[in-house]
Image: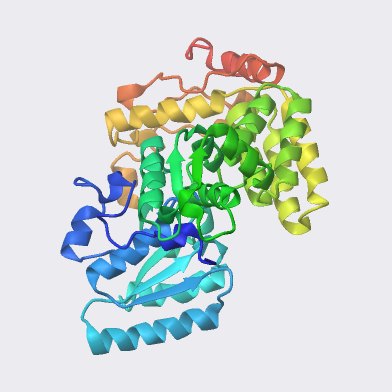
Amino acid sequence: MNTPLAERIRPKSLDEYLSQQHLVGPKGSLTAQLKTGMLPSMILWGPPGTGKTTLSNIIANQSGRPFYSLSAVDSGVAAVREVIEKAKKSETLFSTKSPILFIDEIHRFSKSQQDSLLGAVEKGWVTLIGATTENPSFEVIPALLSRCQVYVLESFSREDMEALLKRALREDTILSTKNVTLKETEALIRLSGGDARKLLNILELVILSESSDSFDGKDEQIIITNNLVMQKAQKNTVLYDKTGEQHYDIISAFIKSIRGSDPNAAVYWLARMIEGGEDIKFIARRLVILASEDIGNANPNALLLANSTFQAVNTIGYPEARISLSQCAIYLATSHKSNASYKAIGEAQQLVRQTGDLSVPLSIRNAPTKLMKQLGYGKEYEYAHNYERNFVPHEFLPEEIKGTTFYKPGNNPKENALKNHLKQLWKNKYDF
C-alpha cells in the first residue's frame, strides 16, 4: 500500500510503454538501436514524469545487459568509480556488451563528478544513460555531451494520459478492486501538466480519499468528475509546480511582461517563481537571453547587467538574490526594445544554409606566409585606422552576396544613432 501507483504500474516492456513514439515507435530514432542492441551512450532530456527512468530500465531489460543505477542527488565521485569498477568486472565475466550505467538527474552532478565518467564512457566500459530535466547544453560538460546522443522526451499527450488512466484503473492491484467510473478527465489532465507520475498520484489521491476504510470498497461507486478532482486535489497541489506546465506558463508570462515593458507584471511573475522555489539559475539565464534577444543594441548595458545578475545570484543564492533578480527584471522591462540583433543572426544563418561555404574574399584573407602573399591574400586590404574617422569603404562579404543587409537597426534612440552613423559611413550602401 506504501508503493505509489506510478511505481506499481511502471511498464516493463516497450509494448506497455506509452508515449514517446518519436523515439520508440516504428520509425523512432531509438528503435533501430534497440533492435540491434548497438546502443550509444545517451542523455534522455525531458520534463518530469515523461518516462526517462522507465525507458532506461526497458532498454537494459531488452538488451540483456547488467544495469547499474545512481542518483546524482546522493552520489559522489567515489560512488561513480565504485559502480564503474563493478561494471568493468561484469562486462568481463558475463558479456561482450558494456553494462548500462543509469544516472538520474545527471544535471546535478558537478564538473568533477561528470569528469569521472569520461574515461569509462570513452573506453566503452559502460553505456551511459543520463536523465535530466534541464537543458544538457548548459548542465552537461561538453566533453561528456559530445560522447552521448541526446534524445528529447515530450510531455504526455492528452490521448496518452487518458490511456494511462484507463490502464491504472484496469490493471493496478489496488484500484482495480474499487468500483470507479472515469466520467471526466479534464481536471486530472490539466493539474498534471503532462507529467504521467503526477497524473497517477492525483488519481490515487482522489480515489483513496473517496474510498471507505473498510475492505468492502468494491461496492462503493466512485465517479471521477472534474469537480471531485478539484475538490480533493486542489488543496494538495502546490500553487507553483516548478517542473510542470506552470513552470513553462509562468516563465512565458515573465518574459513577455518584460518584452512588453511592464515592470509591475514582470515583478509579479518573478515573485510567483521565487515563492515556488524555481531554480535561480533558470530565471537568471532567461534574463541573459532576453537582454540580447529583445533589447540588444537599443541598450547594450542590458546584457552587462543581466550577465552580472547571473553571476551574482549564483554567488548569493536565495533569499537575497531575489533583490538582484528584481533589479534586473525592472531594468530590462523599462529599457528600449529591439530584436534587430536576434533577427540579423537568424537571417544570416538562413542565407548560409542556402548558399553554403562561400569563399572568403582574397583581400581579407589571412596571409601569414610568403606563398599566401604571392597568391594575393590580403593584397587589397586597406587598414581602416590609417584613414579619416578610422574608416575606408570595403566589401567584406563574399562576391555572391555583397551588399546584403542583415542588421537593420531598430527604431529607438540608441539604434537610431547607430543607423545615422552607418549611413554617414556607408552612404547609400545599406537599406535601413
In the image, residue 249 above or below residue 65: above
Query: How far across and how far down the image is residue 25, in percent?
Result: 24, 47
- Where residue 59 sits, quadrant-wise, is bottom left
Figure check: 399 above or below 245: above
Locate residue 248 relative to residue 325 in the image: left or right.
left
Q: Is residue 201 visible?
A: yes
Type of colouring:
rainbow
Q: On screen, 4 above or below 225?
A: below
Name the spot of residue 78 as percent of width and height, x first. Answer: 53, 83
- Point out residue 174 in the picture as x, y percentages from the top left corner: 45, 59
- Quarter assignment of residue 155: top left
Residue under the image location 29 percent in, 28 percent down: 354
Q: Nearer the viewer, residue 73 or 186?
A: 186
The answer to whether one can see residue 366 in this image is: no
Number of marks drawn:
0
| x and y percentages locating residue 308 in the rendered image | 73, 47
Which residue is more in the foreground, 278 or 203?
Answer: 203
Question: Viewer-proximal residue, 209 or 383?
Answer: 209
Residue at the image position 47 percent from the left and 58 percent from the top: 5
Q: Is residue 358 above or below residue 216?
A: above
Q: Residue at the left extreme? A: 36
